[in-house]
Amino acid sequence: MVNLTLLGCGGNVPLPNRFLSSLFMNFNGRKILVDCGEGTQVSMKMKGCGFKDIDLICITHTHGDHIIGLIGLLSTMGNSERKKPVTIIGPVGIKEAMDAIQVLITLPYKLNIIENPEGRFSLVDPILTDLSIETIELEHSTECIGYNFYFARHPKFNIEKAQLNNVPRKYWNMLQKGMTIMDGDVNYTPDMVLGDDRKGIKISMITDTRPLDTIPEFIEDADLFICEAMYGDEMDISKAIKNKHMLFREAASLAVMGNVKQLLLTHFSPSIEEPDVFENNAKSVFENTIIGYDRFSTQIKYPEE
């Protein structure tokens, strides 16, 4: 199960009731932050997310409404006696941006920067072994990437299989944890006691882009598709094209084409005081749409077997 909180759902300029873009995910105690706009720390404090032990920060692009909160957050993590390195993933330009931030602040821990990763990959980190990430290039006014987060689910222990393979009972627990054991000239491997692979959780995040032909395949079958919806009014299509953003309806159309299970809209223009007013523009296309708001929380559970 993944616990998810939309810390901020605003675009460009913060409002009294709407902070800037940020998403927090907690998976078995592992904490992932996607973007860090202004107000991120306030929402994290209100939701009790915890600052010190964030395991991974993913940045979609280096516009201020997506990274300006990093200065304060990284400082707070340092003031919380954080010593463990922090991994930050981002598009082309993230290294330069982080170099600039470190001119302004001194941190008591190291930053591991991964710039513009391509394809699907996993991190060499024992804490994040059950997570793999995939990126996609988007169309914005600066280098921008979207993310897929895949949360793996371990196979169940299969006692019949263990007995059939004559695996000694004393090794069952270690094999179930993924260890391989040599006993004399016999090699015992996890697949000798585990059942079939089980479907995990896929969460897709696409923001600050025009709709692209590559997006539906990228988000295909996602359990949750989080997508920007800068403009709600159909009459704002010219603004969306000019500023390289999306309408509510365009985000919903991507959800349909990607066969996702649920759509969460975010990154609303400051000109939209009440995004719910335009709810039908999305729901008439994709019914299972949620209009995001600051500190909205949900749980994404594993598929039923």
Image (cartoon, grey):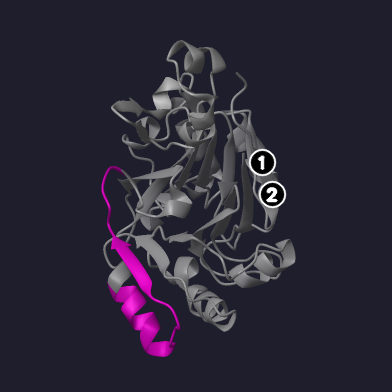
In the picture, the disc for residue 208 is none
Which of label 2 and label 1 is nearer to you?
1
Is residue 113 one of those drawn in magenta? yes
107 to 39, vertically: above or below: below
Q: Are marks 2 and 1 in contact (CB under 8 Å)?
A: yes
Q: x%, y% of residue 159?
A: 55, 17
Q: Residue at x 56, y 72 (%)?
A: 38
The type of residue carrying mark 1 is Gln
Q: Residue at x 40, y 64 (%)?
A: 87
Point out the stretch of residues depicted in magenta.
96-120
Residue beneath label 2, please?
297
Q: x%, y% of residue 17?
A: 71, 65
Foreground of the two, 170 or 298: 170
Is residue 61 one of those drawn in magenta? no
10 Å crowding of disc 2: few (<14), some (14-19), many (20+): some
What is the spatial separation of the Cα atoms under label 2 and label 1, in whole angstroms?
A: 7 Å
Q: x%, y% of residue 284?
A: 61, 28
Q: Where is the C terminus found, in terms of image quarters?
A: top right
The local secondary structure at tag 1 comes to strand
Residue beneath label 1, please?
299
31 to 197, vertically: above or below: below
Q: x%, y% of residue 57?
A: 46, 61
Foreground of the two, 193 or 250: 193
19 to 116, vertically: above or below: below
Foreground of the two, 13 or 262: 262
